[in-house]
Image (cartoon, grey):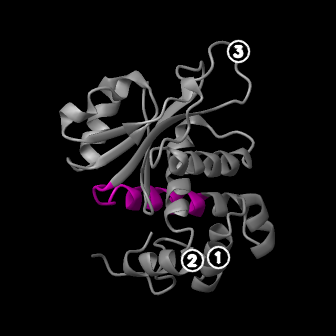
Amino acid sequence: MPKKSGKNRYIYHSQISEKKFRQLLKLFCLDLNASTVSTQIHLQRKTVNRIFMLLRKRIAFLCEKELMFSGEVEIDESYFGARRVRGKRGRGAKGKIPVIGILKRNGAVYSKPIKNCTRTQLMPIIKGKILEGSTIHTDGWKSYDGLILDGYKHKRVFHSKDEFVRGKSHVNGIESFWSFTKRRLNKFNGIKKKYFLLHLKESEYRWNHRKQDLYKILLEEFREKSL
């Protein structure tokens, strides 16, 4: 590992002090936008934006290191984009980005943008993240047909028939993540498509650590491996 700069052990090639970086990180963890952070700690907006980008790229990397899921797992898809788009709604909504979400009950969530919600798109992700023998809960979408043949136990509810809970079968957990993420992203008043993945993974990381001290976790991460 390259030797860390004596000026700031948390971030390479930076002109800001460690104290200033810690202030910025605390405000980032409070989910304040770059404009507000720039004003509060007296840093140029472009400097804050640059560091925010580095933070989000590291967070996206950390999300991909999560372990496989097992046990009781929920799967669902959601669509992100402009609130009002003419044309088809729901699955296949025009102009929106489809995302698959996988949630371990009482555990972590994993999310990933996809081209569409076909079985061809969904199954490689499911097999890559969920161990065989796990119980998968979904709605009635046809692309989930045949999960039993792929080595999973499959429980489903049929939203098209106004069925949202059947015993322990539901997708309420992953739907809570969708609500959390959409509320967060709405604060930005629009996100460029090329940055969507970074914001999605940031939401995922925040959700997975919502009961922990995010500032302490990230500070330790950057102390071990600088930005």
Which one is nearer the viewer's eye here, 53 or 215?
215
Magenta segment includes 52: yes
Q: Secondary structure at mark 2?
A: helix
Q: Work out whether mark 1 precedes mark 3 in sequence or the reverse, and give the earlier one.
A: 1
Q: Where does label 2 land, which residue?
A: 215
Residues at discs 1 and 3 in contact (Cβ within 8 Å): no
Can residue 124 be seen here? The reply is yes
In the rendered image, which quarter is residue 137 located in?
top left
| Badge 3 density bin: few <14, some 14–19, many ≥20, Cα 10 Å | few
Q: Residue at x 54, y 60 (%)?
A: 207
Which one is nearer the viewer's eye here, 177 or 226?
177
The amino acid on which the numbered mark 3 sits, given as a three-letter code, is: Arg
Q: Where does label 1 land, which residue?
A: 26
For the residues labelled 1 and 3, the Cα–Cα distance comes to 40 Å
The amino acid on which the numbered mark 2 sits, given as a three-letter code, is: Tyr
Q: Work out whether mark 2 precedes mark 1 in sequence or the reverse, and give the earlier one.
A: 1
Q: Is residue 224 left or right of residue 12?
A: left
> What percent of the width, then of the height, locates residue 135?
31, 47
Quadrant of the snapshot with the N terminus: bottom left
Residues at discs 2 and 1 in contact (Cβ within 8 Å): yes
Q: Work out whether mark 2 precedes mark 3 in sequence or the reverse, and give the earlier one.
A: 3
> What percent of the width, then of the height, locates residue 73?
37, 50
- Bounds of the magenta span? 50-71
Q: Residue at x 24, y 41 (%)?
A: 152
The vertical placement of 146 against 131, above or below, is above
Which one is nearer the viewer's eye here, 172 or 19?
172
